[in-house]
Image (cartoon, rainbow, N blue to C red):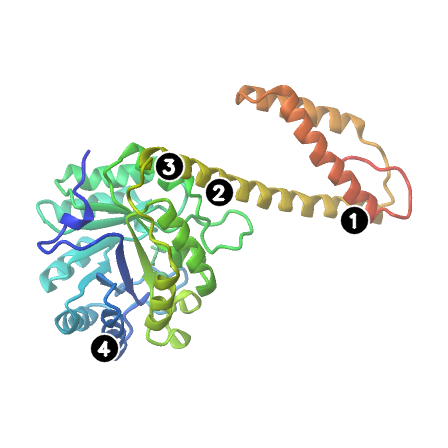
Amino acid sequence: MTFPPISNWFEKSFDTPLIIAGPCSAENRQQVIDTALELAKLNRVHVFRAGIWKPRSRPGSFQGAGNVALEWLMEAKQLTGLKMAIEVATPQHVDFALKHGIDILWVGARTSSNPFSVDELAHSLAGVDVPILVKNPVNPDIELWLGIIERFHHVGITKLGAIHRGFSPFRRSSYRNIPKWEVPIDLKSYLPTLPVICDPSHIAGRANLIQGIAQKALDLAMDGLMIESHINPGVALSDAKQQITPGELSTLLDSLTFRKQSSANAEFMDTLETLREEIDSIDHQLLELLWQRMELVERIGRHKKENNVAIMQLRRWEEMIRLRVELGESLGLDKEYVKNLLRLVHKESIRKQAEILSQGGELSPE
Ligand code: PEP
Ligand code: MN
């Protein structure tokens, strides 16, 4: 599968990285127009985004303004010249969007988790020459993400791109959605010509984390950024914490280092950088897991103390080592390496429990 670059999506080519910005939701005419005018003034935003049918987790929250918002977006387009992008989840949404002249459609994370919905969308888009951006499914399932892109490609859509918006946290995390950078990197290695854009707003969940994530995306040579921007985030009806004003977006964009595409050893440097970023991401996850493990060790320590238990559970420790070394070996990891690593982890667990059981008594492994 090959895909045209973003710069060739429209008659007038624009420079990449592509910058998409706009509110999480279109709320009313004034909010849409004011935000679009401010964003257009920055002269760096290519596409205005706004959700008009919102897939909210809980019923009763703001569900989006619906069809009437299409009129507001078209007015904003006329006033600013910005391309307009909205999320579509049903063939009916596609129909309304295309009738009104929306320029780019995106498929949200919840919809891209459901192949039935995507099949319906793909059929409604057959023969239509509108760019489609596919957000990653909520769980880190590369096959599912690839499969959704294939479904659109099979009906003849080639102006396709992927949006990396992170993955639902299955553990405590500082992010709203865990980036797991290795997943979009994998996607790029399967489909090297596919444009991949990052949505740091939905990864971050908080305005102050957006910059770091956006920079990482640029360092990974991603093809664009989608950032939520609202004229007055404090009163936003959805995702208020992660939206930034157009002025803040301007400061943020100024602070980013846009990587040059070429250097004397571009290929070597790019590969090295990509691999290092993957390592960084994995180390980040390793440390978060170690932190979670330590919390469990503390609970075990307190539990033992409360129950006055101080038995050296040697068998448990031996069994743990045996099973983990076996697992490590089956993954191709050196036996001594795994043993040393476990010893280190275990030693710190013992030290922690010693702190908790500091009144004395024997210590036992977790
Ligand atoms: C959005 O872009 O506002 C949105 C709902 O995002 P996601 O599908 O990534 O949750
Ligand atoms: Mn949002």
Q: Where does ligand 1 appear, by image quarter?
A: bottom left
Q: Label 4, on which residue? A: 29
**Disc 1 versus disc 2: nearer the observer:** 2
Between marks 2 and 4, how big is the CA–CA gap? Answer: 41 Å
Mark 1 and 3 residues: CB-CB less than 8 Å, in contact? no
Q: Is residue 4 left or right of residue 240?
A: left
Q: Is residue 287 left or right of residue 257?
A: right
Between marks 2 and 3, how big is the CA–CA gap? Answer: 18 Å
Residue at image position (12%, 71%) is 78
Q: Quadrant of residue 186?
A: top left
* Quadrant containing the N terminus in the rendered view: top left
Q: Quadrant of residue 141?
A: top left
Mark 1 is on which residue type?
Arg
Residue 223 in the image, given as x and y percentages of width and height:
28, 48
> Earlier along the polypeptide chain: callout 4 or callout 1?
4
Mark 4 is on which residue type?
Arg
Q: Label 3, on which residue? A: 269
Between marks 3 and 4, how big is the CA–CA gap? Answer: 47 Å
Q: Label 2, on which residue? A: 281
Q: Is residue 154 above or below residue 64?
A: above
The circle on residue 302 is: 1
